[in-house]
Amino acid sequence: MPLSRNNKASIVTLIVDYDAGNLASVKRACQQVGLDAEFCADPDQLRHAKRVIFPGVGAAGSAMASVKARGLDEALREVISNGCPVLGICLGMQISLDYSEENDTPTLGLIAGEVTRFRMDRPDLKVPHMGWNEVCVQQAHPVLEGIEAGDEFYFVHGYFPTPKDNAAILATTDYEGHFASAIGKDSYIGTQFHPEKSGRVGLRLLSNFAQWDGQC
Amino acid sequence: MLSKRVIACLDVRDGHLAKSVKFVNTQNIGDPVEKAHEYYIDGLDELVFYDITASSDKRNIMLDVVESVASQVFIPLSVGGGIRSVSDATDLRLAGAEKINVNSAAVKRPELIDECASAIGNQNVVLSMDIRKVTKSSDIPSGYEIVINGGRSPMGLDALVWALDGEKRGAGELVINSIDADGTKDGYEIELTSMIAQAVRIPVIASGGAGLPEHLYEVLTKGHADAALVASMVHYGDYKVSELKGYLHDQGLKIRMSW
């Protein structure tokens, strides 16, 4: 996929397009906060990104297969080691851990920990966890700035992340107990919720990300 | 803990907003894009567009409506009406719809649910059901029957059986629309909503009959619904979305109050 403008390869934000999913809503929300983003499925192009958004579509197994087949896993590791700000969303966040119970999938291992399914043994608990829920910030982070107690974000997921190291947990949400709804390490941050579908607070998060230099 | 959702449904015909009463005598009441944005700013949790355009050559108008809404409204957007294939669903998704509502076409060909679920994910497939109360019989043991064609054609299909089948086939959510209550403003069909909501493990959206804030409270508590769908009570300015949410919050329900 060619970039729309010449010689801007090093200053653009790229939305990683690793599957045939619908990523248009992420792009629209980026536009709304003044972040000019392009779709990208090419690892070499990804290596030159200034900022990367890694959204999620489908299931962990097919997503990882697609990421690997395109060589996007190595490119992603590289940009993160160079300090490039990366935002993972939903499944894009989940595959940043070591392992996902979904399709028994070894994942990228950017953050130590696992992804497991909500337990189905409580009849009143509906899975997927779908709708608006509170995100409680546990650690100040430039991308989470301005998110206040009681602010809610939109979630749609059946699996959730558990980082090994508490230092990687940036925010939590309560559904069958508390789970990590935002995680991060170095220049990587991932959210279980969808900032692009979360109204004003979601746009605030994207706008914070647009200005983040990757330092915590 | 999840918040209960308030969802506004906008019926769109030929690109204009329409509101049906018992599915007949639809009248134009404004611009859907403008209304959608107004509700978004006022704290709406989710939007549903229902395309009631009759002629198929005008159906592309809906894609334009969805696209302009999606570029200024950043909450989940669901679209239904006339979806017969995965390709209809995909077109709407590319235009900016998050979720796809299937209804009549799924009753006629239930595999449509399986196909859409595997193409766009279970969580994005909403099974919308139009339901009428009937005398209990061996064919309709729950006493609620699925109807299509805007309520004109009874299908001999039990609503509870269809809800469970839809869940099994991969629907991620159900809309329970009572044809009897639709447009009456007398309140939702509580018995029907509660029966289905307690039988399935997926979220249930109650639809049809809302006229007062109390009706929403009733269906979100006694009716066990996860979300309440409103239409005319907000379209004609009787209530504001924020007013409804404020009322539900004051009654002690978990409601998203900061937007």
Image: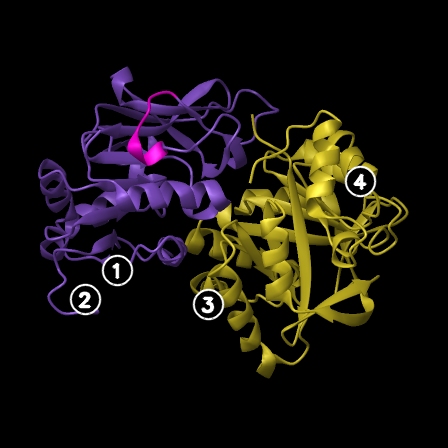
In magenta, the rendered stretch is A138-144
Q: Is residue A212 left or right of residue A181?
A: left
Question: Toward the viewer: B196 or A138?
Answer: A138
Residue B239, numbered circle: none
Residue B91, numbered circle: 3
Q: CA distance from mark 4 to mark 2?
A: 50 Å
Q: Are marks 1 and 2 in contact (CB under 8 Å)?
A: yes
Tags 3 and 2 on a common chain: no
Q: Which residue is mark 4?
A: B213
Q: Which quadrant would the C terminus of chain A be assigned to in this image?
A: top left
Q: Chain of mark 3?
A: B
Q: Which quadrant would the N terminus of chain A be assigned to in this image?
A: bottom left
Q: Is residue A90 above or below residue B237?
A: above
Are there few (<14), some (14-19), or many (20+) residues within 10 Å of tag 2? some
Pair 3/1: label in front: 1
Q: Is residue A88 left or right of residue B148?
A: left
Q: Is residue B79 left or right of residue A170?
A: right
Q: CA distance from mark 1 to mark 4?
A: 44 Å
Q: Is residue A165 above or below residue A81?
A: above
| N-terminal label among 3 and 4 | 3
**At 38% across and 35% down in the image, what residue appears?**
A192
Q: Colour of chain B?
A: yellow
Tags 4 and 2 on a common chain: no
Q: Colour of chain A?
A: purple
Tags 1 and 2 on a common chain: yes
| N-terminal label among 1 and 2 | 2
Regarding mark 1 in the picture, which secondary structure is present there?
A: strand
Residue A3, numbered circle: 2
Q: Are marks 3 and 2 in contact (CB under 8 Å)?
A: no
Q: Chain of mark 1?
A: A
